[in-house]
Amino acid sequence: MENGIKYALITGGTSGIGKELAKLFADDGFNLIIVARSEGDLDTTKQELESEFGIEVITIAKDLSQVNAGGEVYQQVSDRQIAIDVLVNDAGQGQFGLFTESDMNRLLEIIQLNVISLTTLTHLFLKEMLAHDKGKILQLGSIASETPGPWQAVYHATKAFVLSFSESVRQEIKDSNVTITVLEPGATDTDFFNKADMQDSKITDSKMSDPAEVAKDGYNALMAGKDKIISGFKNKMLVTANNIMPDTMAAAQMEKMQEPKK
């Protein structure tokens, strides 16, 4: 932060939890850099946020499921000579279906987005934050980080990576003033389920969390420097129960929750 100007970079910042987080940062006086695939959605979100909050919004149209996209986002920010005070790795997708029946190219795109781009952005921006000994990173995990996930095997695995990776790096930088926080929501009322082709999954019949409430939980935990936050009482209970039972039992329970409707 130079001369009182703060910048937060948010991937997936045009919809769902990412957009709600963008509103919270904007309300707190942060200028924003939002990253998403659609230039139209970026332009609309930019106009909304600048009009409502009177802050500057820079947009970067980039598909983070593509190779090298994370590095290209970093380069664009670096070219503008902007120091990022907060990095929010929100962008993420899943794919519903049995692993062997899923499209391999689609699964690799999900790994690229959820794991490789997140890791790349964390690595590049964290090095800068450590050089200035200040900054915060919010990673979008999921309660899927905590349990095996039949019918979404790759998605659950990527979110397990996010949690393990983030907690490991947080320990490595414990002596600095930089913090890493993982936000773990459950099923949330966003476009995730449409993009993941999950309309026929039983989980869509469950009560969805409000993305604004999830974002608020994540924002407060980030600002408090917490290591992680499971959003929602029901999700906390589910994770606690899964942590007690054997992995095979947890996987069987998750299979019943996510399997196709009869």
Image (tube, grey):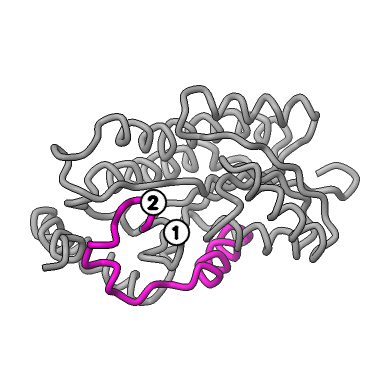
Name which quarter of the figure residue 201 lies in: bottom left
Q: Position of residue 24 (x, y in %)?
A: 67, 64
Instruction: Name the residue beneath numbered marker 1.
Output: 191
- The amino acid type of the residue labelled 1 equals Asp
Would residue 134 appear left or right of 253 to someone viewing this image? right
State the mark number for residue 117: none
| Residue at disc 1, secondary structure | loop
Query: In the image, what residue occupies the spot 63% across and 59% down?
Result: 223
Task: Give above or below for 247 relative to 237.
Answer: above
Secondary structure that dominates the magenta span: helix
Instruction: Reply yes or no: does residue 97 show up in magenta.
Output: no
- In depth, the one of 81 and 154 nearer the eye is 154
Does residue 200 belong to the magenta stretch?
A: yes
- Identity, as a three-letter code, of the amino acid under mark 2: Lys
Please tell me in which quadrant of the rendered image residue 221 appears. bottom right
Q: Are marks 2 and 1 in contact (CB under 8 Å)?
A: yes
The residue labelled by disc 2 is: 195
Which quadrant, please, contains the C terminus?
bottom left
Determine the residue positioned at 60% across, 58% down.
19
* Res 177 seen here: no
